[in-house]
Amino acid sequence: MVATIGLAGRLPFAEFGPERKIVWKTAISYLMEHVSTMLSEVVQDRPLGKSHG
């Protein structure tokens, strides 16, 4: 999926036409999933940081 987003990012968006929305939805959904994973890791690490402090 990452390779698809990278490939789509290199092409001019004018070539996509109606497919541009699909590409953006895929990229946004991937980013949101990645961000939510990062946030969950941060939340899990936070209690450890408080116990050390």
Image (cartoon, rainbow, N blue to C red):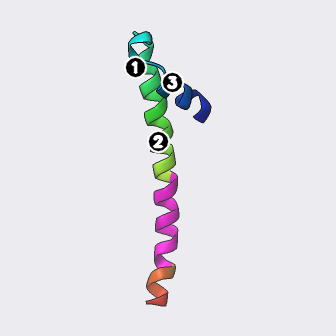
Depth check: give the residue in front, 48 or 31: 31
Q: Is residue 7 above or below residue 41?
A: above
Residue placed furthest toward the bottom = 53
Span highlighted in magenta in the image: 37-47
Near-viewer residue (3 or 25): 3
* 42 over 9 or under it: above or below: below
Q: Assess whether residue 23 is covered by the magenta stretch.
A: no
Secondary structure under badge 1? helix
- Above or below 6: residue 12: above
Q: Distance from label 3 to label 1 (Cα)?
A: 12 Å
Image position, residue 50 (x, y; %): 44, 84
SS at mark 3? helix
Q: Badge 1 local density, few (<14 within 10 Å), some, or many (20+)? A: few
Residue type at tag 1: Lys
**Does any portion of residue 1 appear in the rendered image?**
no
The residue that label 1 is drawn on is 21
Residue at 48% in and 66% down: 42
Q: Nearer the viewer, mark 3 or mark 1?
A: 3
38 with respect to 3 (left or right): left
Give above or below for 52 relative to 9.
Answer: below
Magenta span main SS = helix
Name the residue beneath numbered marker 3: 8
The spot of residue 46 in percent (x, y) is 46, 74
Q: Residues within 10 Å of mark 3 (few under 14, many from 20)?
A: some
Is residue 51 at all visible to an observer of this figure? yes
Residue picked out by circle 2: 31
Amino acid found under the numbered disc labelled 2: Leu
Q: Quadrant of the C terminus?
A: bottom left
Report the side of 14 relative to 41 (left or right): left
Q: Which quarter of the rendering shows the N terminus? A: top right
At a point 46% along the width and 67% down the height, the residue shown is 43
Q: Earlier in the sequence, mark 2 or mark 1?
A: 1
